Amino acid sequence: MADNSVFVGNKNFMNYVTAVVMQFTTKDAKEVIVKARGKFISRAVDVAEVATKRFLENQVEVKDIKIDSEEFQNKEGKNVRVSTIEITLAKKD
Amino acid sequence: MADNSVFVGNKNFMNYVTAVVMQFTTKDAKEVIVKARGKFISRAVDVAEVATKRFLENQVEVKDIKIDSEEFQNKEGKNVRVSTIEITLAKKD
């Protein structure tokens, strides 16, 4: 499944949408997981919505959404918490 | 259910966490729905994570997450799409 993940960050928005669409079309993936952390979570939701509603309408749907947190120490040794999201998109039967 | 919704925007982060926690504690709600649109989606996930993991650990869990889009016309008459999220938090049995 690792190959079918699209990690959303600060590149051009359409890069991520295209990556998702390509996984389903040219690579014939059954599932693609859109992942993001922190402030990029909003963007991951946009990517999932645009991919499923504009480009792959009636073909791909949101199958599952998970949220979680990661804790780590920053450079100053302070504990920092960051939220994560994983949106699983799947081909409709 | 409308009373049990917390709509996340640009107010102080802890306002929203407190609102969620208060619904479960002083108002004894069984479910609270954390909602947001656009760029505030990341913040809604943070609110849900902090409320369930720091303040209501072992008492409240994420029951369901829905994402969707709304389309509307902006002032210039252009169609604009905005993503939305609804995170349902529920008391554990």
Image (spheres, coloured by chain):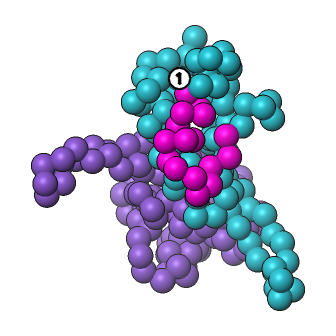
Chain colours: A cyan, B purple
Which quarter of the rendering shows the N terminus of chain A?
A: top right
Relative to A2, is A29 on the left or the right? left
Quadrant housing the C terminus of chain A = top right
For residue B11, what is the image quadrant?
bottom left
Q: Quadrant of residue A24?
A: top right
Name the residue type under label 1.
Val
- Please state the total of marks drawn on the protein image: 1
Most extreme residue toward the bottom is A76
Q: Judge the density around disc 1: few (<14), some (14-19), many (≥20) Cα neighbours within 10 Å.
A: many
Rendered view: B62 above or below A78: above
Q: Residue beneath label 1, please?
A: A60
Left or right of residue B23, residue B76 in this image: left
Q: From what the image shows, is residue A25 above or below residue B28?
A: above
Q: What stretch of residues is rendered in magenta?
A: A6-21
Q: Secondary structure at mark 1?
A: strand
Q: Position of residue A18 (x, y in %)?
A: 54, 33
Query: In which chain is the residue bearing label 1?
Result: A
Instruction: Judge whether residue B3 can be spotted in this image.
Output: yes
Q: Position of residue B46 (x, y in %)?
A: 61, 67
In front: B19, or A62? A62
Relative to B62, does residue A79 appear above or below in the rendering? below
Q: Is-magenta flag for residue A8?
A: yes
Q: Is residue B92 magenta?
A: no
- In the image, what residue occupies the spot 71% across and 67% down? A82
Which residue is at a point 59% across and 32% down the rendered structure image? A20
Residue at 53%, 23% (x, y): give it: A60
| Residue A38 x/y as whole percent | 63, 64
**Res A90 visible:** no
**x and y, in percent, of residue A50 in the image:** 44, 37
Nearest the viewer among A13 and B11 is A13
Q: Nearer the viewer, residue B39 or A12?
A: A12
